[in-house]
Amino acid sequence: MYARVSTYSGDMENLLQHFQSVIAALEQWNGLDHVHLLVSHETGRAITLSVWADKESMERSEADADEMRDRVTTLAGVRTDSIERFELARTIQGPASKGLLSLLHDDLVTEVGAPREPA
């Protein structure tokens, strides 16, 4: 898998508002696995991390990604600070991402605040 990481600075509320307008289009991109949008309202900085099934899919998306990024940042009044590409070397999943916490919770609690009786 491969990833494109872009960083931004400016008004994060505006970025969030205008990013919302491109979600449906992103969900249709061939080869796109997922996108994370990380924001810091305190610093006025954001990061997008798009993860791709393969390098070719990521490369094929470049022109559309550039156009979409330019449109969103222009409308939001934020600046694109950097764009980098990486090979995804490792993914580590904790218990929460594997659904174990909800399984444990469901197994131990029958209703809010009422522990299940031991079998």
Image: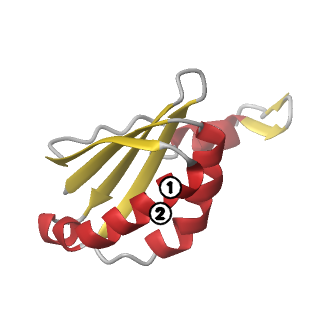
* Residue beneath the point at 78% across and 34% down: 116
Q: Is residue 42 above or below residue 116?
A: above
Q: Residue furthest top?
A: 42
User: In the rendered view of the protein, which quadrant contains the N terminus?
Assistant: bottom left
User: In the rendered view of the protein, which quadrant contains the C terminus?
Assistant: top right
Q: On the rendered structure, is 21 left or right of 94?
A: right
- Give percent across and percent down for residue 59: 17, 67
Between residue 99 and residue 78, name the one nearer to us. 78
Q: On the rendered structure, is 7 left or right of 55?
A: right
Mark 2 and mark 1 residues within 8 Å of each other at the beta carbon: yes
Rendering colour mode? secondary structure
Neighbour tally class for label 2: few under 14, some 14-19, many 20 plus, Cα within 10 Å: some
Residue hosting label 2: 71
* Residue beneath the point at 32% across and 63% down: 66
Q: Is residue 58 above or below residue 36?
A: below
- Give percent across and percent down for residue 90: 19, 41
Identify the image quadrant of residue 44. top right
Q: On the rendered structure, is 51 left or right of 8?
A: left
Between residue 35 and residue 10, name the one nearer to us. 10
Q: Which mark is residue 108?
A: none
Name the kind of residue labelled 1 in the image. Answer: Thr
- Give percent across and percent down for residue 110: 80, 41
Between residue 94 and residue 58, name the one nearer to us. 58
Q: Which mark is residue 74?
A: 1
- Give percent across and percent down for residue 43: 53, 22
Residue 87 visible in image? no
Residue 51 visible in image? yes
SS at badge 1: helix
Name the kind of residue labelled 2 in the image. Answer: Arg
Q: CA distance from mark 2 to mark 1?
A: 5 Å
SS at badge 2: helix
* Residue beneath the point at 86% across and 31% down: 114
